[in-house]
Amino acid sequence: MADDRSSKLLLVFLAFAVLLNFPVLDLADRPGAFNGIPRLYFYLFFVWLVLIVAVGLIVRKKK
Amino acid sequence: MGLSLVIGCSLAYISLLFFIAWWVDRLAERGVSVVKNPYVYALSLAVYCTAWTFFGSVGRATTGGLSFLGVYLGPSLLAPLWYMLLRKMILISKNQRITSIADFISSRYGKSATLGVIVTLIAVLGIVPYISIQLKAVTFGINTLTHFGQSPPPPPQAIWLDSGFWVAVSMALFTVFFGTRKLDPNERHEGLVAAVAFESIIKLGAFLGVGIFVTFGLYHGFADLFSQAEAHEATARMFSLEGSGVTPFSWNILMVLSLFAIMLLPRQFHISVVENTSSRHISKAMWIFPLYLLLINIFVFPVALAGKMLFDGSVHPDTYVLSLPLARGANWLALAAFIGGFSAATSMVVVEATALSIMFSNHIVVPLLIKTRSIGRSGDLVSGANRLLDIRRVSILILLFLAYWYQKSVGSTYDLVSVGLISFTAVAQLAPAFIGAMYWKRATHQGAVTGLLVGFLVWAYCLPLPSMALAGIIPRGFVDNGLFGIGLLKPYALFGMAGVDPITHAAFWSLLLNAWLYCIVSINTKSSTLNLTQADLFVNIHKYIGGQDSDVLKREAKIGDLRNLLNRFLGENRTIALFREYEAANGISIENHKVAQADLVNFAETQLSGAIGSASARLVMDSIVKEETITLDEVMRILEQTREAVEHSRTMEEKNAELKALTLQLTAANDQLKHLDRLKADFITTVTHELRTPLTSIRSLTKIILDYRSELPEEKIREYLHILVSESDRVSRLINQVLDLEKIQGEAATAPARQTIELADMVARTAAGMEQLFREKQVSFSLEKETVEGFELPGDHDRLVQVITNLLSNALKFAPAGHGQVTASLQRQNDAVLLRIRDNGPGIAPDKQTLIFEKFTQLSRRETGKPEGSGLGLYITKTIVEQHGGQLRVESRPGEGAMFEVRLPLNLG
């Protein structure tokens, strides 16, 4: 249902708007690394990728 | 590396782009659309990634750490909302034939020419810095490739020796060839879109190539690069935003700016909305485009770290993408990287300049020409589709020249991203009016104008003006001390807000004041009718899709004028095709009409909007259109009134008719009453007179007998006594007849009793009863019957006897004594019986023949003495006959006797 999708996508927008902005971003903006990848760098790209996958899954054509 | 090689490769690359565009356009003409594809759409959206992304992000990362990512995270964050937002933008734009962001905003707020101008100025002036960094990046790239490792070339002596100038010129020519080849009413350029999509692949590939070369060629992967960088003094602080001097405030503002930019940048609007072939492509673009952004950014940070570590400040960070391969002798990779950056720059310039030139010509030049009446009329200087294209070509040249000038005078001292963000801040000023356009119906034209103007002025005061002052173009006093020496008006610390970077500072204040004033003014002003209808159309676009445009302004224009106008702007062939399309869609023939109705006028205006923008189209249309300007309220009121009036007048008419009928009845009744009254008066006069006459003679004769009884001879007395008897008879007969009359008239309403009457028998018996009278007067009587039988009819016995008696005594009365003859005859005629009674008396004059049937009409027979009878006989007879559904008439000529004919129907049905 189209309306259903719109609401889901709006929720995705709100959730990631929180994740990608301060103050939540401050939690990742600290020294440290994940498998040799700097913490903030990893966090931003990981959240970004999750956002893309989430959107892709929601708009995927239903069989 | 030789300059000729670099230029040769660039030209070859441009030729390839031309070939792609030409090939795609040719396919499109054959009906094969390469562009109609969600992947091409998503890739063309990547026109967002310019030389800024390609060269500038790396430079930015060296100072601002990961803050460069904000520019790409904003659009990625907005992508989920495209499902509603972008779809709505596309629906509205297709419905209204909107061709630019200026068109969109001007169309929403009542097709306002003013707003078109304001938005165009904001866009053009705001984007000039952005274009300038593309020129700068390409110039930088060429210089890096040709002079790597040498001291920078000395500043050129003349403008034609400056490579930047030639970059600007070639970019301008390239744009002119690409963007203004033909005038398409939908502003669709399939070749351009295909070329842009192709360039997106090239720039992504080139950047990934450099990134992989740096990360895996110069270092052993990400972990190695990062660990080395963390150990390095110059790069260690780049890993955190805090360490890079990025405040949460500036990060959040950057996210907001980029989020707006992806919607509002003229080239993004052009590619995502105007060039969109199907709104179904949005879904795929929603995740492919962010993925593209993610990929092109993965290696930015590693490249920046590597450059910083390897060059340690000896090379400009904006050129790391080229310098790193060059430093390791990978010249071909450097050349490929340059082509990638060149791709990014050219695609941006071409699309941006094309979009801006459309805005510039449609919202500034054309309205101006229309206002000064030098376009849109026959025999004018500037008209026709080619002229429109010329205007666009000139605007592109002006735009590129402005950008070149800006780069030379102001931009050279700043890095790419700082300059680019000035443009982002300018374009973000459109956001309140733009978002309100789609979701806030109450927003007014005045609100949009105020918000935009104030936002633009604050932006100009806080960003480009101080930078121009610092470059020495204008006096710099206001930067240090504030305007008019007021400290609170310092452009980098407005209202005392210090310690914030200029972009964040300017964006905050300009957007805040802009949005605030937009809302406040909108709430306190009233919408025009057109603004109201457009607002409804924009906000509730789904209501209008597939339906007719609802235009309360009923407009008319002459077909000929309309045709001339379209010819002038769209060309003759296109006009004919459009009219045919309209005829086919509506099933009417335009040739048969002289006047174009509102529907056709709207259609033509929408088509024209595609070529010259909605506000200009409105202006041109106004010159030929007769319009009834009425407000919506008035329309509603008129409709309401009309409905009421119709209802009211209908009841009034009904009442009126009733009244009229009633009046007629009353008049008739009154007439009848008056008539009756007169008749009654007449009747009484006549009756008393008739009674007095015999009474007078009775009285006088009685007196004579009483006084002279002894002297009068016996005979005389006998004679007098006879007279007394006959006069008494006359009085009693008169009284009887008056009573009869009353009785008959009283019963007039009720039908006479129905008995079966044998008329022939009745006539014979009545005549026999009067035999003595006939004999006395010596008048002969005869009865003639045509047939023996068949005179039975329904009727009232006593009354019909009276009819016969009256007619016979009447005939007897007038028949001459001695040789008189009275004849009665009976005859069948169709469904009626005719009874004729004839006498051979003196006859009746023609003028008296209708009179005799009236009450108390006695034929004055002065020659025969006083009248006999009461004058009621024939009247009573006629009344009875008519009560039986028959007729009584007379035929007579003076001296030839009279014939009374009674016609009685055999059945009354």
Image (spheres, coloured by chain):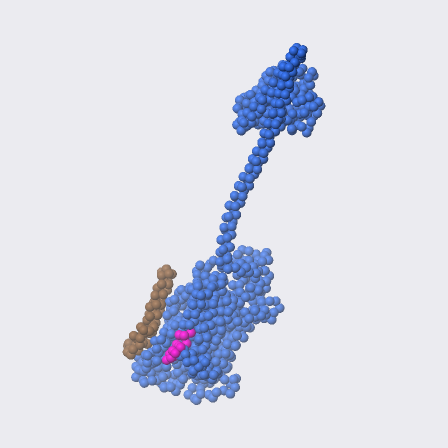
User: How many numbered discs, if any?
Assistant: 0
Tell me the quarter of the image containing the C terminus of chain B: top right
Residue displayed at 58% across by 35% down: B671
Q: What is the x, y in percent for residue B181? A: 53, 71
Q: Is residue B547 visible?
A: yes
Quadrant of residue B856 within the rendered picture: top right
Residue displayed at 45% across by 70% down: B451
Q: Is residue A41 above or below residue B811?
A: below
Q: Is residue B195 visible?
A: no
Q: What is the x, y in percent for residue B810? A: 64, 21
With B785 as the anchor, is B18 left or right in this view? left
Of the chain colours in the picture, the one used for chain B is: blue
Of the chain colours in the picture, the one used for chain A is: brown
Q: What is the x, y in percent for residue B618? A: 53, 65
- Which region of the structure is painted magenta? B495-510
Tell me the quarter of the image containing the N terminus of chain B: bottom left
Residue displayed at 67% across by 25% down: B860
**Residue B33 painted magenta:** no
Quadrant of residue B756 within the rendered picture: top right
Between B58 and B242, the one nearer to me in the picture? B242
